[in-house]
Image: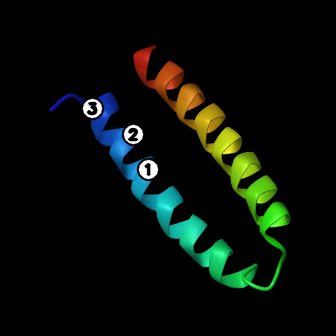
Amino acid sequence: MNKPFLWEMIIFIVTVGVAIIVFNLIDDLPSLARLGISVVMFLCIFEISKYVRKRLNH
């Protein structure tokens, strides 16, 4: 197993954990707001994982 893949797995697991916590916190929000927050979170995670991958390659 190569290292970047391992890092991505760790990032993914951490993000899923954070997402579950956030979803529990915003359970009383309307579904549209929840969808918006989840999209924003996904984009943030995507950018962070891209940055981490770039840092690991150098």
Q: Are marks 3 and 1 in contact (CB under 8 Å)?
A: no
- Residue 43 numbered mark, or none: none
Please state which amino acid type lies under the numbered disc 3.
Answer: Lys
Q: Residue furthest top?
A: 58
Vertical comparison of 27 with 50: above or below: below
- Residue 8 numbered mark, or none: 2
Q: Residue furthest left?
A: 1
The residue depicted at 47 percent of the width and 25 percent of the height is 53
Residue underneath mark 1:
12
The residue depicted at 76 percent of the width and 47 percent of the height is 40
Dot placed on the residue nearer the N-terminal end, 3 or 1? 3
The residue depicted at 83 percent of the width and 78 percent of the height is 29
User: What SS does tag 1 mark?
Assistant: helix
Vertical comparison of 2 with 34: above or below: above
User: What SS does tag 3 mark?
Assistant: helix
Please state which amino acid type lies under the numbered disc 2.
Answer: Glu
